[in-house]
Amino acid sequence: MSVMSLNDIKAEYPLHWHVWNNNVDELKRTLKNEQIDKEKIDPRGRTPLMLAVKLSHIQCVKCLLAAKCNATYEFEGWSIVQEAVCSGDEEILTAILEVRDLQRHVQRVTHVPKLLQYLLDAPDFYIEMKWEFTSWVPLMTRYCPSDTYKVYKRGANVRIDTTLLGFDSNQWQRGNRSYIFKGSKDTATMIEIDHETSEVMIEEMNNEIGDIIGIPPPIGAVRARLNAPVITNNIEMARISFERNKSGIWGWRSEKSEHISGYNCKVYGASNVEFVTKTRMDHLSEEQIRIKQARTPLHSFLGIADDEYVPNTEIVRTPTPQMIENNEHQVEEEDSASNSSGSAASRHDITPEEYFSEIDLGGRDIGRPKKVTTKVQRFKANLWLSEDYPIRLQEQVLPILDLMSAMASPHVSKLKDFITMQLPSGFPVKVEIPLFHVLNACITFGNVFALTTPVDNVTTINEDDRITCIVDDRCFDIPSHYTNRDADTRRQLPLEEDDMLQYAIEKSLVETSGGACGIAEGSETERVDIWEALRGQAVGADSNVLTEEDEQMQRVLQESLCGARVTSSPTSDDDDGGFRFMDPDLAMALRLSRQDQQQYELDRKREEEMLEQVLKLSLQEH
């Protein structure tokens, strides 16, 4: 491939060229041309906005954002927001976050009416989706919750009931919410009903957005991001293959089938399911990297510790026993640009002719040198497919999953990505997939058309050749005695990167680190919270923003370790063991776990006393 000349670059990539040279006046002039492609991708996969962020040209960034360039663009798994974090520039990150959040809101409120209109012609139905979370980490599974989404669909109206709302600083957060979507040709109404507080929030969604003012992110959240690694998690879908599971032994083996929710299902195993975690620390100092990557016993136990950053090296870590048992594998590799000093690389290290030509740069790049750690965990996924299921995946279920994703359910997005692959024929009645580092999900579709268990306002129709149902309009009514709450449109943004929530959660854990769940570190007065132990972070160090997936793992780990703690003296029957304000079911599980641990300690103490007595008798005989 020949090298492009400067004149060819100016003609082919005019916006990129002005960004490269940080020529703001020419950039503004060119953007006035309505025919210009503001989202054109250069040979390195970058739009003009991503290039401006990578080069840390703040005025170009603001100019492109004012021209409504896409701030949600991603390339090779890295978003513009993440590139802004890696730039280490507070002003750039603030500007990108403000516009990105605004664009996400606009995409959401314009996309929902289209989804509901798409559902209009699909047959009405009722179905339940049961989510069960499990883990290979000891004690964790018993504290993982389950939830059942109840989905009602009639025409362009959809109602989704859920009880698992999220996570707070102590436990999985429970509630009783209904999300009702009412659609028409160009508009939709989203109604959130809180059945515990008897409050209702109503939000209108349509294609005519009008003028919406962006809200700058809190400065504390921005700075917390800049002091935390950038982490992405994804499942490598392209490598997954499906194979029919076998039953029986040796020569009598046959293809496996099971009855799930009353339907005969073929059982498939998915191989090469790789959960990939990438961590970038371009913007962190070597001291920050060293602190964040310090090993602890808990790091090694979980198999999620990072090795110390060493430029241009590849590290393959021996799998832990837990990984071997769960068929998991981890690989870590480091990637850096040609400038290995750790300082921001100048764009002049690469000429424009080199950058804009489709030639191999030999690992070099513009901007700061990359410091990337990649970890791969291999899982087994299973799939139960039925040829006779009365619900259609494409026309009925997938639009519902899109709506649930709009409700800020990132785990639903992972399910959608998985079942939209090229699956074997049939409806996925049951699916087992990995969600996070140590957390799996089992999703089962059931009670279709209310066939198994009767449901209020759903009437099952069993005809000779098919089964359907009628969903009453009353399912989508607001209870008359409920009170309205003003809609905060920005509050409805997806929560996978809700900085303030993540920041507040970690701060609360730091403040309570001296409590019963603290882990001794050095002296008795030095105690760290669960996440500090996982990070190997010193007490009192700056808080970091957690990714939602790591935040969720933290919630469960904390409860698991709290449940396993041993008190110094037996508790009375009236003692609540510190679980007074928890969900009753969770509190009971924690009490039982503590009692089991105490019994184990008592048995071990008796064995030691018996051994000591035997030794004394032995000495007396001699």
Image: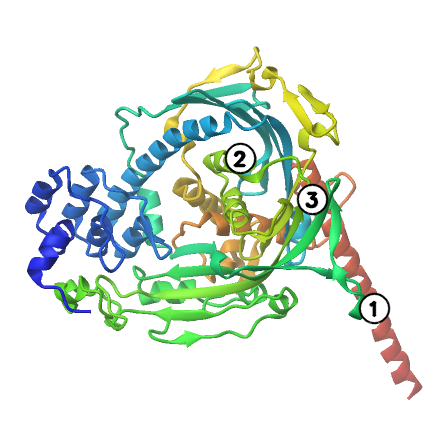
Mark 2 nearby-residue class (10 Å; few <14, some 14–19, many ≥20): some
Q: Which residue is mark 1?
A: 607
Considering the numbered disc 3 on the image, is that residue within a helix, a strand or a loop? Answer: loop
* Above or below 435: residue 214: above
Considering the numbered disc 1 on the image, is that residue within a helix, a strand or a loop? Answer: helix
- Which residue, as the protein is rendered here, is positioned at the far bottom? 622
For this rendering, which residue is in front, 561 or 494? 494
Which amino acid type is shown beneath numbered disc 2? Glu
Q: Earlier in the sequence, mark 2 or mark 1?
A: 2
- Which residue, as the protein is rendered here, is positioned at the far front? 465
Which amino acid type is shown beneath numbered disc 3? Gly
Where residue 595 appears, x then y in whole percent?
A: 76, 51
For this rendering, which residue is in front, 23 or 429? 429
Q: Is residue 241 left or right of residue 257?
A: left
Q: Which residue is mark 3?
A: 577
Which residue shows up at 56% across the image and 10% down it? Answer: 480
Which residue shows up at 39% across the image and 43% down it? Answer: 499
